Amino acid sequence: MNEYLVIKYIHILSASILFGTGIGIAFFKWVTDRSRDNRVIRIVTERTVLADWIFTTPAIGLQLITGLRLAYLAGYPILTGWVFYALCLFILAGCCWLPVVWFQMRMRDIAIAADNGHSQLPDRYWEYTRVWFWLGVPAFLALTVVYWLMVYKPAL
């Protein structure tokens, strides 16, 4: 079996998982927050954190490992050209994602406490939600450009 094609398959699959879970998680959390239903927000926020650990985290690792291996096998230099820009944007997305995970865990804990106490979500939850959302915007845009770079491989 051709090593390049096997790694490319894993790379494409993990890119799909990364992108799909990212946008799916963001959509469902955003829609759920609009409901203002503490019980629903608690459940979705708990599942958001779980989904990031089960799907997003491994996909990130696979993307980095397989992407670097594909560049090596194809003879693309890592520190120049489109691969370099893709790597920089991937790191940018990761720098946005790490605090997003921290905020998700805090929001989960706040939602659990509010649901258990039958109280409204405090302002802090909504502040975290705003930061969480706005950190997601550059991460999403960066990964969109990474996809473009992977497909078109422009001479930069």
Image (cartoon, rainbow, N blue to C red):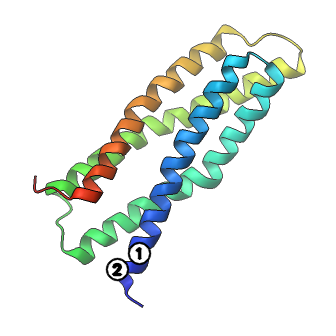
Do tag 1 and tag 2 residues touch (Cβ < 8 Å)? yes
Local secondary structure at mark 2: helix
Cα separation between marks 1 and 2 = 5 Å
Up/down of 104 relative to 10, above or below? above
Residue located beneath label 2 in the image = 4
Local secondary structure at mark 1: helix
Q: Position of residue 105 (x, y in %)?
A: 66, 33
Number of numbered tags placed on the structure image: 2
Label 2 environment density (alpha carbons within 10 Å; few <14, some 14–19, many ≥20): some
Up/down of 97 relative to 37, above or below? below
Point 31% across, 71% down: residue? 70
Left or right: where does residue 88 sit relative to residue 49? left
Point 43% across, 35% down: residue? 96
Please name whichever residue, 137 or 27, is drawn nearer the observer in this view of the structure: 27
Q: Position of residue 86 (x, y in %)?
A: 27, 51
Q: Position of residue 125 (x, y in %)?
A: 66, 17
Point 63% across, 50% down: residue? 53
Point 42% across, 43% down: residue? 94
Tell me the kind of residue under disc 1. Ile
Up/down of 76 relative to 21, above or below? below
Label 1 environment density (alpha carbons within 10 Å; few <14, some 14–19, many ≥20): some
Tell me the kind of residue under disc 2. Tyr
Left or right: where does residue 74 sit relative to residue 93? left
Q: Position of residue 76 (x, y in %)?
A: 18, 68
Up/down of 1 relative to 73, above or below? below
Question: What label does residue 115 carry, if any?
Answer: none
The answer to which quarter of the image holds residue 134 is top left
Residue located beneath label 1 in the image = 7
Q: Residue furthest left?
A: 156
